[in-house]
Amino acid sequence: ELRTPMNAIKGFTNLVLRRDKSMEEKSRENLEKVDHASDHLLTMINDLLDLSKIEAGRMDVNPEQFNIKELVASCCDTVSPLIQDGVELRQDVSDGEANTDRARVQQMVINLLSNAIKFTDTGSVTVKAERETRPSHEALARPAGGGESGGENLVISVTDTGKGIPADELPTLFDEYRQVEGASESKVQKGTGLGLSITKKFAELLGGVIGVESEVGKGSTFTVRVPVELSATDA
C-alpha cells in the first residue's frame, strides 16, 4: 500500500520525460527532481518495511548459489550514479561462490557502499570480498532457525577515505534512526538512519556479524562476515 502510490508517481514522471520531447528545459529539470525525490522516498519506505518485517519475525531467508564477483559488480553498478567527481570506486573480489540469501547480501553491500560514498568527497571507496576459513575458536551467531553452518565465512568489507567516525559515536552507530554527525553537510540526501541498523540485522539473520573500524580524517572500514553455506533447514 505504501509502495503503490510512489511507483505510480515514478512511472508517470518517467513516461512524461520519455514522450514529451518538446518540454522546456526548466520543466524537464523539475520533473527529474521529482523522479530523484521519488527514488529517495521509495528507499526510505523500503527501509521502514524491512525493519518492521525483521522486528515482527516475518523476514524470510532464501539461500541460493551465486557468484560472489558477479554480485559485487552488480552492487557497484547500482551505486555508481552516486559517486562524486574525484572519487574512485574500486573492487577487489576473489573468485568463488556462496550459498546464502543473495538478496540480503546484495542489500547489505549496497547499503555499505551507499553510506561510504555519501561521506567520501575525494579518494576512493573500495569493496573487497573473499571466502576465508573460519578459525576453530570463532563462533558466529547461528542463522535464523538454528542448525549448523559451514566452515567458511564470506567476508565483505567496504573501505572509504572519507571523514571518518568519531570514537564516541561507534558504540551507537548501528542503532535505529542513528545519523552520523555531519551527515547534513553531505551533498547526498539524508536517509532514515536505518541503513546500518538493517545491515546489522541482515548479517545476524544470516548467522553473521558486522564490525567497523574508523579514524577521523582518514576514513572507515565496515566488515560483514556471514557463513558461506546456509542450508535450507537453517532458513
Image (spheres, rainbow, N blue to C red):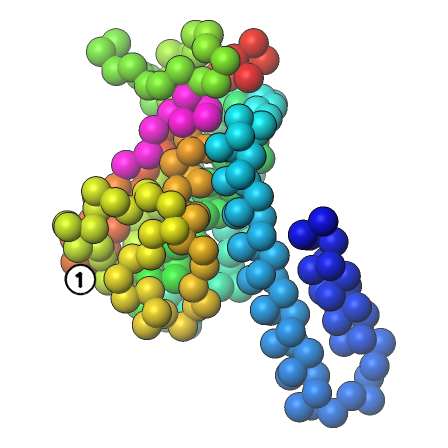
Q: Residue at x 33, y 44 (%)?
A: 175
- Can you see residue 222? yes
Q: Residue at x 32, y 43 (%)?
A: 174
| Residue found farthest to the right | 19
Asked whether residue 18 is drawn in magenta, I would say: no
Pick whichever, 36 or 191, lies toward us.
191
How far from the left and from the top, in percent, is residue 182? 28, 66
The residue beneath circle 1 is 217
Pick whichever, 198 or 93, lies toward us.
198
Instruction: Please state which amino acid type lies under the numbered disc 1.
Output: Gly
Magenta residues?
Answer: 204-211
- Number of dots carrying numbers: 1
Q: Is residue 165 left or right of residue 195?
A: left
Judged from the image, the secondary structure of the residue bearing numbered disc 1 is: loop
Callout 1 crowding tier (Cα within 10 Å): few <14, some 14–19, many ≥20: few
- Can you see residue 123? no
Res 148 → quadrant: top left
Res 135 → quadrant: top left
Pick whichever, 90 or 197, lies toward us.
197
Q: Residue at x 21, y 42 (%)?
A: 171
Q: Is residue 199 left or right of residue 63?
A: left
Q: Residue at x 25, y 45 (%)?
A: 172
Q: Is residue 125 left or right of residue 47?
A: left
Pick whichever, 11 or 19, lies toward us.
11
Task: Name the quadrant of the C terminus.
Answer: top right
How far from the left and from the top, in percent, is residue 99? 54, 21
Against 110, is 88 above or below? below
